[in-house]
Amino acid sequence: MNLNLIKPKVKGESDKYSWNLYKYLHKYKGNTRVYYNKSDIMSSDKDSYNKNTLRLSDILVGTPVEHEDSVIGNSLLEILRKVPSQQYWYQSALITYSDITEEFYNDYIDIGRCLIDNSHTGWLRNTDNRFTYINDNERKCNWCGIEQHREVEEVIKHVTNWI
């Protein structure tokens, strides 16, 4: 993968792309692959990677170990928090994973960190220029192109207290 395609414009700051992911991939460049963890005892519908229902903890970024069915790397969740100083050994006996490198990179190049926050809730850092506001009730994401409109709904909550 050409890392220049996902390099943020300002060193040390995320924009459409994550600085931490870029830095991690640059640090461990070579045969770095992206894997999807399909083994989750809490879910029966985790057969394949889906960019619309991505859980960061299900994505593993690392290097396959030759002659072994295992990977040395880190979870995407850890990489996005802070570039880890060490890597871990993930054995296939403990995890069932599939290689999604091409699909993940294509999605990430196309939509950037919207892959991580696909609901556009705004919890990502450095997102000041993420949206173009069309008017008070409509906006367009500058990273992935999705258009959203604002809806206001009234929520009535009744609380019972014993006093």
Image (cartoon, rainbow, N blue to C red):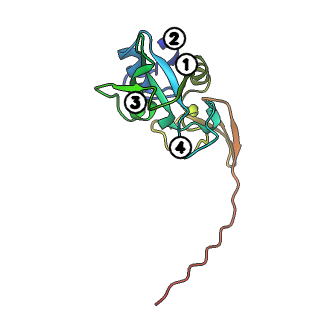
Q: Give the secondary structure at mark 4.
A: loop
* 4 or 1: tag closer to the N-terminus: 4
What residue lies at 67% left-to-right and 48% top-to-bottom? 136
Callout in the foreground (4, 1) = 4
Q: Residue at x 61, y 24 (%)?
A: 107
- Residue 155 visible (yes or no): yes
Residue marked by disc 3: 79
| Measured Cα–Cα span from mark 2 to mark 1 | 9 Å
Element type at mark 1? helix
First along the sequence among labels 3 and 4: 4
Residue behind mark 4? 41
Circle 4 packing at 10 Å, graded few (<14), some (14-19), many (20+), is few
**Kind of residue at badge 1:** Thr
Q: Spot the residue most to the left.
A: 85
Give the image quarter of residue 64. Answer: top left
Q: State the residue at coordinates (68%, 35%).
A: 146
Dot 4 amino acid type: Ile
Which amino acid is tagged 3?
Ile
Question: For this rendering, which residue is in front, 22 or 38?
Answer: 38
Nearer the camera: disc 1 or disc 3: 1
Describe the element under mark 2 as helix, strand or loop. Answer: loop
Residue 65 circle label: none
Check disc 2 and report the residue beneath it: 1
Q: In the rendered view, does 59 fall on the left or right side of 45?
A: left
Choose the circle earlier in sequence order: 2 or 1: 2
- Mark 1–mark 3 Cα distance, whole angstroms, equals 16 Å
Is the Cβ of the residue at disc 2 closer than 8 Å to that at disc 1? yes
Q: Position of residue 153 (x, y in %)?
A: 69, 62
Q: Residue 143 in the image: state x and y as whole percent.
A: 60, 29
Which circle marks residue 101 in the picture?
Answer: 1
Disc nearer the start of the sequence (4/2): 2
